[in-house]
Amino acid sequence: MPFVENGAVAIEGTKIAAVGETEAIKKQYGDAEFIDAKGGVIMPAFINTHEHIYSAMARGLSIKGYNPKGFLDILDGQWWTIDRHLTLEQTKYSAVETLISCIRNGVTTVFDHHASFGQIGGSLFTIADVAKELGVRACLCYEISDRDGMDKARESVMENAEFIRYALKDDTDMIAGMMGMHAQFTISDATMELAAANKPDEVGYHIHVAEGIEDLHDCLKKYGKRIVDRLMDFNILGEKTLLGHCIYINPHEMDLIKDTNTMVVHNPESNMGNACGCPPTMELVHRGILTGLGTDGYTHDMIESYKVANVLHKHHLCDANAAWGEVPKMLFENNAAIANRYFKTPLGVLKEGAAGDVIVVDYNPPTQLDASNINGHILFGMTGRDVVTTVANGRVLMKDREIKVIDVEEAMAKIAKANKAKEDFGSDFGSADGWGEVMEDEDDDDSAWA
């Protein structure tokens, strides 16, 4: 908003200098490089407020005996098994693959929640280096957890603290850090206290909350309180803290989240895929809680998440009117508001002084497209892969579907080499605790696939 027909955006340096009709902009900035949108739709680049870069190499993976009966089985049998063996090299190439996909889908700002218990130290710095190389804005954290012992929990806290201090000194407005936590059910009071003692005041936490009912049951059994109450007791809530999922929370917990100005991010495809349930997202939005939209690593296409969230809440609430306004508000307004609690330059908007984060979508509407119906055109007519040009911070990352910031063919060859463990698990991942048992289960033709 406003909608400009035959419009153009002028970017000078890292920021938008002007927005208006093409001829007027051309006249004012005649010497600038001109990227022809060819009748497509020029939009602000997308923001993903909950991503998992480390999951990139899970695609197509088959694990012997993997037959999850619930959410905890999915975590331990798949994701924790993977992250326990990731090397820094594999973390690097997970980031390369993910961020290439982000660029192709028009995503230029990512809030990532990382885990690589195979090699913790330096993992956030490794991802940050890739983000800088590829030109994507990134807010990073490491998911603290006691699940692999207290030594690794402490190392996770220190990786967060060291990276946060590094990010706070960065003056590019392209890198930020948070104190990451897995979920309360894998974090002891002692680790909560250690994280608080090492967290700089300028940042908050990024933590999964009530993603599965097991998380709530654990908190009630161990501490006699609900999850958000426990987080409140440890001073985790606040305007810089981002809570992922929030499926099994009640009105009292919503009040705490609202009163502390804490942020929430909804990840519809992940919640459905893991059979975790449908969160009360529409109620969160109606209560005025700052609620954004993420992918949880399930996809890197924010339009896909928009589509799924739209039908999920209609189906769940048996209300055909649900989600029409709430989900685009989450994607286009709230994600920007969440991002701007960590990045100074205005994001998610095409206006003078905002970040030079702009995409061009190849879309030729069969019906009238204007300010009143743009959301319907995006929802029903576009996908992330319709993006043909991606600009971030004034840098052209992709033009006419050609990635400009990295040799994609060479990168994919290196990714395949780093991921050779899919074919020879003993080499990179080791087999002492079961990774050597992956691939086809000879006794069971119904092996599960990630």
Image: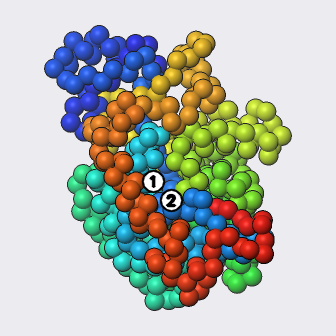
Q: Residue under circle 2?
A: 56
Q: Residue under circle 1?
A: 98
Q: Is residue 116 visible?
A: no
State the image coordinates of residue 314 (x, y, percent, origin top left): 76, 39
Q: Is residue 159 above or below residue 338?
A: below
Q: Is residue 443 left or right of residue 393?
A: right
Q: Are marks 1 and 2 in contact (CB under 8 Å)?
A: yes
User: For the residue marked with disc 2, what is the amino acid?
Assistant: Ala
Earlier in the chain: of badge 1 and badge 2, it is 2
State the image coordinates of residue 415 (x, y, percent, origin top left): 41, 60
State the image coordinates of residue 281 (x, y, percent, origin top left): 68, 49
Q: Residues within 10 Å of mark 1 (few under 14, many from 20)?
A: many
Question: Of 257 and 35, which appears nearest the observer?
Answer: 35
Q: Is residue 128 left or right of residue 442?
A: left
Q: Residue at x 67, y 32 (%)?
A: 324
User: For the residue marked with disc 1, what is the amino acid?
Assistant: Thr
Q: Secondary structure beneath disc 1? A: helix
Label of residue 439 in the image: none
Q: Is residue 274 visible?
A: yes
Q: Is residue 118 above or below residue 170?
A: below
